Image: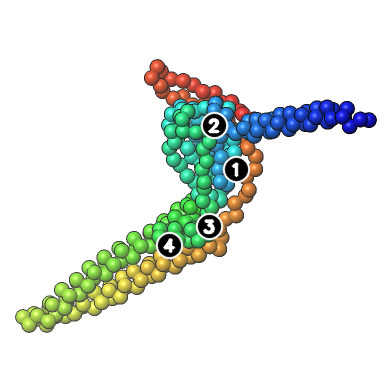
Amino acid sequence: MNPCTRRPATMCLGMMATIFLLAGGQNVALAQSSNGPRPDCVVVSSIPAGVMITLQGEYEFVGRTPFTLPYSLTGQYRIKATKDGYESKARDHIFSLSNGHIYEISLTRRTPVRAFYRSLLLPGWGHFYTDRKAWGVFYSSLITTSFVAAAVNQSRYRDSQSEYEDAFGRFTNAEANFAEQNIAFADMQRSLRDLDHYKKKRNRSLYFAGGVWLFSMLENLIFFPTYPHEKGATLAVIPSLNPIADGATLQVRIPIK
């Protein structure tokens, strides 16, 4: 075939290929832009994923990240984020059409070291931190009771010390007769026994409180809970009756797939 007759066909094929590539590039660009959030929806994400999010405002939403609300939100919402093994977080956020449609929240992982230091600062705090509230109440109550007992025995120790000083003053009084000195001496002996008794009880209470406190701190390191990995993603609109300017509105539960 004459090369001159093949040139128009080659040019046509080249033009068709160019048009196809341009059209394909436009389609790719459109596909990429369509993956972004639409202006009429809200995307809620988190680090890590799988965080249970509660939005409380004009409407109330509960879902596990990442999820997308198929409509926009306006106004102030209280956002609560919880996940097993991570510190919970709550904050206020004002949604509007101008401040974006993507909301991301980050949670901090719970660790045995953080639980240890919390128990060091306040008995039972580390157990509340790891969602073991019953143990937190137990340790805090036991340690607090021990310190109260130590304070009571310390007060009685001081009273006995004052009684001893008073009896010693009567015993060394030059104007006291023999009978009065005998009574004062007996009071001194009784006060000394009371001093020794309340001192031992005070020290035992302090030693017990310190031992339990130390054990509660170490227990957070040794028996730190293992949190299960949460799976699945759900989103729902919870019934919420909220007053507005014209009265009240009732929202119904709507599962969103």
Q: Amino acid at mark 2?
A: Val
Q: Which element type, helix, strand or loop, lies under badge 4?
A: helix
- The mark closer to the camera, 3 or 2, is 2
The residue singled out by tag 4 in the image is 120
The residue singled out by tag 1 in the image is 50
Q: Is residue 24 left or right of residue 198?
A: right
Please determine whether, in this image, residue 12 is positioned above or below residue 126: above
Q: Dots 3 and 1: beta carbons under 8 Å? A: no
Q: How far is the residue under mark 3 from the one under mark 1?
A: 19 Å
The residue singled out by tag 2 in the image is 42
Residue located 79% across and 31% down the image? 14
- The mark closer to the camera, 4 or 2, is 2
Q: How far is the residue under mark 3 from the one under mark 2?
A: 32 Å
Q: Quadrant of residue 9?
A: top right
Q: Amino acid at mark 1?
A: Gly
The answer to which of marks 4 and 2 sits earlier in the sequence is 2
Judging depth in this view, the residue of 242 and 9 nearest the camera is 9
- The mark closer to the camera, 4 or 3, is 3
Q: Which element type, helix, strand or loop, lies under badge 2?
A: strand
The answer to which of marks 1 and 4 sits earlier in the sequence is 1
Q: Quadrant of residue 207?
A: bottom left
Q: Dots 4 and 2: beta carbons under 8 Å? A: no
> Is the N terminus in the top left, top right, bottom left or bottom right quadrant?
top right
Q: Which mark is residue 111?
A: 3
- The mark closer to the camera, 2 or 1, is 2
Q: How far is the residue under mark 4 from the one under mark 2?
A: 42 Å
